[in-house]
Image (cartoon, helix red, strand yellow):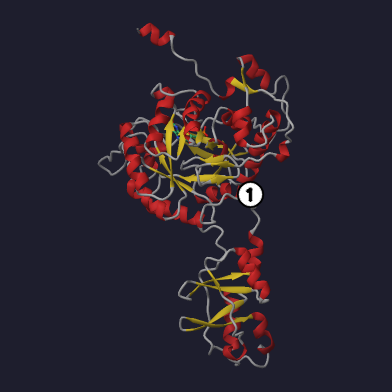
Amino acid sequence: MFRDKIQNARSAYTYDDFLLVPNASWVEAKDVDTSVNLTKDIKLNIPIMSAAMDTVTESDLAIAIAREGGVGVIHRNITQEAQVEEVRKVKNAEDITVRDVITISPDSSVATVQELMENESVSGLPVMDGDEIIGIISKRDVRPYLKNGSKTLVKEIMTSEVVTITEKASPEEALDLAYEHKVERLPVVDENKKLVGILTIKDILNQDQHPNAALGKDGKYLVAAACGPFDLDRAMALDQAGADIISIDCAHAHNMNVVKFAETIKENIDADLCMGNIATREAAEDLIAHGADGLKVGIGPGSICTTRIVAGIGVPQLTAIADVADVANDAGIPVIADGGLRYSGDIAKAIGAGADVVMLGSLLAGTYESPGDLVTMNGRKYKQYRGMGSMGAMTGGSGGGADRYFQELEKGNSGQMKHSKLVPEGVEGVVQYKGRVSEVVFQLVGGLKASMGYCGAPDIPTMKKVARFVKISSSGIKESHPHDLLITNESPNYPTLD
Ligand code: XMP
């Protein structure tokens, strides 16, 4: 019986064990469509998510990745209030409406207007009679009076026909209105006609620099947020703050208490519910039956993970993806391949094995937008990167690291967290600094597009179908990497110095 367990064990594989086989192709890399449905209602323009880790995703990185067409998952190793604030920052990122409006009374003098405009660096002010907006005055209106008429009153020279716009109007509608009435700024009013902000043509025109951005149903940048497996309060607060996806963040989502509680979370939020991590088809079946809108796959493949070593648990990632995808695809539930990706080719392999989207930690941790400071060592730049199950993450934040691994923090007599009571499943270190998220994503998506061209796949759903694999040996891996030379110029998509 025990012998059978060993002898009948399946083989399982990961990225380096396989290569994609080129197919006859009419597809050019530049023409492929990398968009993908992350859930029934949420579409990404690139199949990339950033990991819910305290050295990877806060609002800066989530904004940067959404601009490129992906989505960031705000980590939960901060207080609920701080995490809600991070979600709000993403949602307000492209809010070009100036909310802190400086206004002026109709009985103020031109001199006062001029002083206010200079001090506050604004070039136009709404004129208010109590709560009512009765005019607008600009630099151009006051200029002729500055020399000899500085006592002239605002009400004598303001533009009294005020063109306002409601908060719900799209940027296009705002532009049309501004052009039609030949005005440079539009006061924004709420449904009770109360002034809530001001919008300028210049800001609207400057706005559209991210045509590939991933947007939620609210027209704002997409954002996901992680919550603990039993943290209903946090899930509801993040949902109310506008998170498009709530991601139950747990090292073993096939823990049946987690599976069961997911139903309660799901009932109490409007956002889509993503669950993970899992690595088997049985887990996929149970999670789908309990309401998961997306499944996150990966037990121990991550660059900072020690679960496989500490607990002896895990399934090599490509096999895990394929096992889960067989169940999820039939149910129409997207699969997120989380962790273990080192090169752009791994994204293509993950999709070929049935994933819809990949989740990246180490590949994004070294960017300008990730949290944390740059560290310089031996003349090279690095950024800190640590596992959420590492000692530092479990004791250093709000406890989000520890309960991901079902561990409880204990306070010592002095109030310090007791390290000795924790069993870490991750390590702490640094990764090479890589510049802006946009540059990193450009290379990753460029590699994916090249792969889709080789496979003859014009889009991601076709890539999932037509990708064929060959299993390779250790000499095949060796042959795949550059060999028999000393690399003198580092490539942006093939880092050689770690
Ligand atoms: P990469 O390889 O992209 O992996 O750096 C990121 C993913 O790793 C998971 N993660 C952990 N897994 N111990 C683990 O076993 C940890 O301390 C840990 N921290 C993160 C997580 O799924 C992440 O997205």
273 is higher (above) or lower (below) than 95? above
x, y (%) of residue 56?
A: 51, 42
Q: Which residue is mark 1?
A: 212
Q: Nearer the viewer, residue 409 or 285?
A: 285
Compared across the picture, whether 101 is left or right of 314 comes to: right
Residue 450: % across, % down: 69, 33
Which residue sits at x=67%, y=23%? 21
Q: Quadrant of the C terminus?
A: top right
- Residue 256 seen in this snapshot: yes
Picture coordinates of residue 377, whole percent (x, y): 58, 37
Q: In which quadrant of the rendered view does residue 460 lie?
A: top right
Residue 343 in view (yes/no): no
Q: Residue at x 59, y 85 (%)?
A: 160
Q: Is residue 14 above or below residue 371?
A: above
Place of residue 23 in the rendered image (x, y in percent of width and height, measured from the top left): 70, 25
Residue at the image point whose x is 55% and y is 79% from the top: 126
